[in-house]
Image: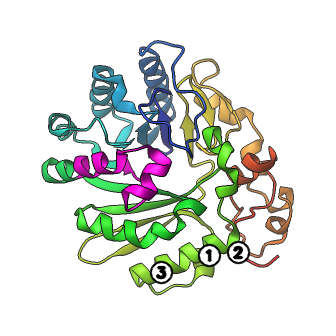
């Protein structure tokens, strides 16, 4: 069966105002029934076109939807096209009662909980006063009661660049299943702190430190095309790279807008108006941004045929989806 995956933002509502957040709006101007309109349209199209999917559900903060969120999980858990469900959350509303309910969903495999530092001083400067202590407490409870994998999510900027080793140790000490490392891209509230964007030297340093932490037999050059990383803890520590998955995964926003990815804010259409497949079939952007000849700067002449740089970063900085990836450390 063919596969296409989604990060689905169910709501703009959030109980935090993180400094680096991709959102600029924190309220919905529509009712909660909108998520079921989107769900029915998406599931129907996937079924009709013979696709299966993994859905990454998030917000805002998805647990602010209350019973509507659990009703959606029930629907998705019993939907044939859905193979796997994951949830991205700040963790503040996940108590033991919630965990017991989540354990019942067979297709729900992973909870991804965000922190931006291994100590309160660093994390709380980004996510808010007192948040580190509250989330760590929740993570301990989740780990004790959950049959679901728990992964810590870490968005790296110049402000918390030094926290990588501490986040690695914190994840291990809490008995978590993994640590996900992503790069800050200045969108939404994050535009106000654009100066905290990593440069190419910062990103190369992160990759070298990841190699040292996980002791994998590789080089930074072999990992340069990856846009994020997952450290998986188990009998052996593994380092997994996340390549750009344009055309293989998409983002759906709370109002139904379809994006190439959450950080690439180039609207492709709206699932409720045009439908998903008609929207992506009507655009030429996805083909053009994966063609070397259309790219600019050193991305155009780069010898790595399988890498197209980060299109989301170029668009965030210049509103040009073909712009050079300034975080790439391969010499031009």
Residue 252: x %, y % from top left: 54, 33
Quarter of the view holding residue 108: top left
Answer whether labels 1 and 2 touch (C-beta < 8 Å): yes
Answer above or below: position of 43 versus 1. Answer: above
Residue density around tag 1, few if under 14, some if 14–19, many if 20 or more, within 10 Å: many
Q: Secondary structure at mark 3?
A: helix
Residue 48 or residue 71, whichever sits in front = 71
Q: Is residue 331 left or right of residue 105?
A: right
**Numbered range of the magenta stretch:** 113-139
Relative to 146, is 160 above or below? below
Residue 277 inside the magenta-drawn segment = no
Tag 3 or tag 2, which sits nearer the N-term?
Answer: 3
Residue 218 appears at what percent x and percent y?
51, 85
- Graded by Cα atoms within 10 Å as few (under 14), some (14 to 19) or many (20 or more), the crowding at tag 3 reads some
* Nearer the observer, 100 or 21: 21
Going from the N terminus, do you reach mark 1 or mark 3 first? 1
Give coordinates of residue 193: x percent, y percent.
65, 49
Task: State the quadrant of the C terminus.
Answer: bottom right
Residues under labels 1 and 2: Cα distance?
Answer: 6 Å
Q: Left of 11 or right of it: where is 273?
A: right
Which residue is identified by label 3? Answer: 211
Residue at 47 percent of width and 80 percent of height: 211
> Which residue position holds label 2?
329
Q: CA distance from mark 2 to mark 3?
A: 16 Å
118 falls in the magenta region: yes
Q: Is residue 186 visible?
A: no
Pointer 1: what residue?
A: 204
Q: Residue at x 64, y 42 (%)?
A: 260
Can residue 304 be seen here? The reply is yes
């Amino acid at each position: 069966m063919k596969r296409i995956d989604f990060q689905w933002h169910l709501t703009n509502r959030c109980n935090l105002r993180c400094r680096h957040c991709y959102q600029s709006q924190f309220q919905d101007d529509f009712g909660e029934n909108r998520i079921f309109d989107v769900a029915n349209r998406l599931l129907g199209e996937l079924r009709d076109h013979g696709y299966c999917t993994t859905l990454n559900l998030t917000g805002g903060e998805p647990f602010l939807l209350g019973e509507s969120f659990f009703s959606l999980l029930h629907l998705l858990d019993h939907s044939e096209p859905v193979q796997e469900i994951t949830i991205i959350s700040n963790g503040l509303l996940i108590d033991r009662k919630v965990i017991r309910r989540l354990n019942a969903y067979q297709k729900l495999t992973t909870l991804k909980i965000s922190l931006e530092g291994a100590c309160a001083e660093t994390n709380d400067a980004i996510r808010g006063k007192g948040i580190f202590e509250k989330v760590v407490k929740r993570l301990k409870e989740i780990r004790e009661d959950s049959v679901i994998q728990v992964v810590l999510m870490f968005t790296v900027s110049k402000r918390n660049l030094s926290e990588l080793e501490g986040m690695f140790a914190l994840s291990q000490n809490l008995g978590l299943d993994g640590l996900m490392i992503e790069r800050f891209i200045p969108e939404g509230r994050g535009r106000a702190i654009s100066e905290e964007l990593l440069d190419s030297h910062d990103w190369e340093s992160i990759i070298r430190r990841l190699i040292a932490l996980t002791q994998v037999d590789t080089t930074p050059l072999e990992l340069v095309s990856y846009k994020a990383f997952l450290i998986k803890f188990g009998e052996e520590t593994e380092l997994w790279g996340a390549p750009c998955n344009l055309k293989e995964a998409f983002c759906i926003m709370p109002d139904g807008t379809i994006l190439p990815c959450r950080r690439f804010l180039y609207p492709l259409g709206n699932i409720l108006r045009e439908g998903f497949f008609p929207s992506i079939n009507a655009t030429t952007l996805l083909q053009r941004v994966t063609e070397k000849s259309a790219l600019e700067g050193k991305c155009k002449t780069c010898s790595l045929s399988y890498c197209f740089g980060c299109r989301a970063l170029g668009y965030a900085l210049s509103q040009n989806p073909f712009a050079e990836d300034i975080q790439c450390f391969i010499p031009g």
